[in-house]
Image (cartoon, helix red, strand yellow):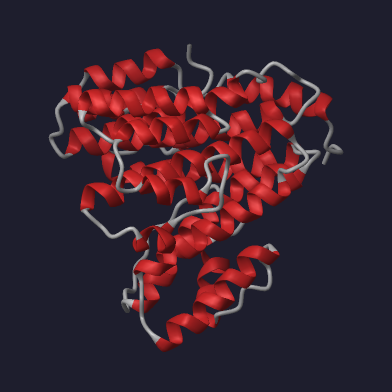
């Protein structure tokens, strides 16, 4: 196998990017029936399954994401950075597997594209041994297992793993300005989203302590102090964010429409834009990660369209939920 280098990665990515689903194919899927959408996927060989039906959609996405993960690992001259993005799928799978074990469920959904396969993660959770994981995640899971021995609390699993993953990502990306901005922005957006959800629920301020993630630019103390104040006070706090402008734009869109999904959409679009700005810098790691994120968002778009149409969701609703694909202008 060729030694990983940016020159080799650039040449390989040129071919891989041509296989990404183009916006016109997404539009074709949106405009037609479920059968039309599946035909559009077949035409671009998505999932590479002959005579695939809508029942095969998860298997198709899994194939695509597994292939993307393998390509990224083969191409990356800097696995310490690319692994941060692949690890997100593993964290999601660990959440699902832990909850399934606690609730005695035999089946668990699987998110493809991570560093570990289904069997490896299942064995980790079954044996309660997490030595193969990065230190921060391993320590968090060991602490979580001890807590779960005393009290079964499935709701604590997601927060514990999200905190550990983000702490690991912030530490690993600290010396890389673009990736540090990415993960600090993720922290700010997600902490503000949590803040808003808790306020909407009428939850006590103490609840914020239990679910808050590591800091990006917005400080814990400022969120606590603003918890029972008006939205104007929140606007002032967001001035300290590392992603102030997109965060405020998302918040204003949320206030205008009444939908918190607008803030989630602003988060996703901003994070993609951070890497889109560097996608043509061939002597860097950015295009490699950009390709993986493109595949990830592509899979989400495919799943949303097929499942939405299969369940009778209005086309207008499906369109509203789609976020822009990587590189789309």
| Image mark count | 0
**As rendered, which of 6 and 148 lies closer to the eye?**
148
Q: Which quarter of the picture shows residue 17?
A: top right
Left or right: where does residue 243 sit relative to residue 135? left
Looking at the image, residue 171 lies above or below residue 248: below
Q: Which quarter of the picture shows residue 54?
A: top left
Counting from the top left corner in percent of width and height, residue 154 is at: 36, 71
Q: Is residue 264 visible?
A: no
- Which residue occupies the extreme right position in the image? 3
Q: Which quarter of the picture shows residue 168?
A: bottom right
Left or right: where does residue 228 sit relative to residue 329? left
**As rendered, which of 101 and 272 lies closer to the eye?**
272
**Position of the N terminus by quadrant:** top right
Counting from the top left corner in percent of width and height, residue 266 is at: 41, 27
Left or right: where does residue 143 sit relative to residue 285? left
**As rendered, which of 264 and 99 lies closer to the eye?**
264
Counting from the top left corner in percent of width and height, residue 258 is at: 20, 31
Looking at the image, residue 208 lies above or below residue 104: above
Counting from the top left corner in percent of width and height, residue 318 is at: 24, 28
Residue at left offset 83%, top offset 24%? 7
Looking at the image, residue 6 lies above or below residue 165: above
Residue at left offset 34%, top offset 74%? 106
- Which residue occupies the extreme bottom position in the image? 150
Looking at the image, residue 128 lies above or below residue 250: below
**As rendered, which of 138 and 207 lies closer to the eye?**
207
Q: Is residue 15 visible?
A: yes
Residue at left offset 25%, top offset 39%? 307
């Amino acid at each position: 196998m060729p030694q990983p280098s940016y020159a080799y990665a650039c040449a390989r990515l040129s071919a891989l990017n041509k296989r990404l689903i183009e916006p016109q194919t997404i539009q074709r899927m949106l405009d037609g029936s479920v059968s039309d959408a599946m035909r559009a996927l077949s035409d671009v060989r998505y999932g590479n399954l002959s005579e695939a039906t809508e029942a095969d959609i998860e298997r198709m996405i899994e194939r695509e994401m597994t292939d993307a993960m393998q390509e990224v690992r083969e191409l990356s001259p800097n696995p310490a950075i690319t692994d941060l993005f692949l690890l997100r799928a593993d964290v999601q799978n660990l959440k699902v597997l832990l909850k399934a074990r606690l609730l005695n469920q035999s089946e668990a959904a699987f998110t493809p594209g991570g560093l570990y396969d289904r069997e490896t993660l299942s064995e980790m959770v079954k044996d309660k041994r997490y030595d193969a994981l990065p230190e921060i995640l391993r320590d968090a899971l060991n602490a979580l297992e001890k807590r779960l021995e005393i009290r079964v609390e499935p709701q604590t699993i997601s927060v514990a793993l999200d905190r550990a993953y983000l702490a690991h990502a912030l530490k690993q990306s600290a010396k890389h300005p673009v990736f540090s901005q990415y993960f600090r922005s993720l922290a700010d957006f997600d902490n503000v989203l949590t803040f808003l959800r808790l306020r909407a629920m009428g939850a006590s301020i103490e609840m914020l302590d239990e679910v808050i993630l590591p800091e990006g630019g917005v400080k814990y103390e400022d969120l606590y102090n603003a918890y029972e104040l008006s939205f104007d006070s929140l606007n002032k706090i967001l001035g300290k964010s590392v992603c102030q402008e997109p965060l405020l734009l998302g918040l204003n869109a949320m206030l205008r429409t009444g939908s918190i999904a607008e803030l989630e959409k602003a988060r996703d679009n901003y994070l993609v834009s951070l890497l889109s700005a560097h996608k043509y810098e061939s002597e860097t790691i950015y295009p490699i990660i950009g390709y993986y994120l493109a595949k990830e968002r592509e899979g989400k778009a495919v799943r949303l369209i097929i499942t939405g149409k299969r369940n009778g969701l209005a086309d207008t609703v499906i369109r509203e939920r789609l976020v822009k694909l990587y590189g789309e202008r």
